[in-house]
Image: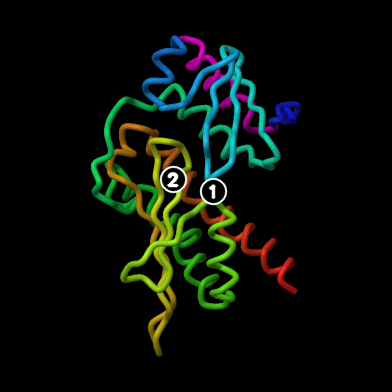
Amino acid sequence: MTNNNHYEGGYAPAFMKSRENLCKLAPESISKGSQCNFSNGRFTIESFGKTIEISYPEGQIISQGLNTSFDARLLLLNYLSYAKNVPFSDQWVSYRDLPHGNVFYPNIKKNVIDALGGFFANCDKDILRHSLIEAGFILLQGKADIAAKGFFAPRIPILLHFWEGEEDIPSTCQILFDSSIRDQMHIEDSAALCGIIKNHVINQYTIAFIEAR
């Protein structure tokens, strides 16, 4: 296990604020809201099939064999103090459908949704299926050409849909959240999560593609 908090750069003020929020709450309350186990002074979060530990009350993030990006670490830390004991709605929605989601959606569409659509158009589909599994997703049967489900955190499931393009219609991607995400994550964190998902999918595919050569 390695502690990766020696340098947080421009994220430092946000981490400091998140740690202040964390230490204001009792561990029992955090565990109930986040569905994360607390033991030996640490919360354990399962994120895309990997284990992240966060110390309490310090809020120091310890990854187990996972090179987690600073923005993903920050969102997981925020999740501990923000998440609520609210059940899944089983209603899948896009970011645009969330309260005030239209504010950030144009940027998300351009830099995440359209980018993933372009990526899907040119990727090896068999390698992508394999890499999605390695990235902590489960492949699903559905109307999409490739569908996969994963969890960024216990109360934040993610559903990915990829469709092949036809003639003048480009390949497309869809990122869906359970509508209860509005209770589990600030809307700005949900926007950042879209970018994290894109990078996670593409980075894992790149690794799988190199290994397959």
Q: Is residue 13 left or right of residue 34?
A: right
Front one among 28 and 6: 28
Residue 139 image-quadrant placement = bottom left
State how the image is colored. Answer: rainbow
Point out the stretch of residues depicted in magenta.
9-24
Above or below, 202 against 212 in this view is above
Residue placed under numbered mark 2 in the picture: 191
Residue contact at pointers 2 and 1, CB within 8 angstroms: no
Q: Position of residue 131 (x, y in %)?
A: 59, 62
Q: Position of residue 23 (x, y in %)?
A: 51, 11
Q: Position of residue 158 (x, y in %)?
A: 41, 50
| Label 1, residues with CA under 10 Å away: few <14, some 14-19, many ≥20 | some
Above or below, 96 against 52 in this view is below
**Label 2 to label 1, Cα distance in Å?**
9 Å
Residue plotted at (53% across, 56% down):
198
Residue plotted at (59% across, 32% down):
52
Above or below, 50 against 33 in this view is below
Q: Earlier in the sequence, mark 2 or mark 1?
A: 2
Label 1: which secondary element: helix
Front one among 90 and 120: 90
Between tags 2 and 1, which lies in front? Answer: 1
Residue 145 image-quadrant placement = bottom left
Amino acid at pointer 2: Ala
Q: Is residue 15 magenta?
A: yes
Residue placed under numbered mark 1 in the picture: 196
Above or below, 88 against 145 in this view is above
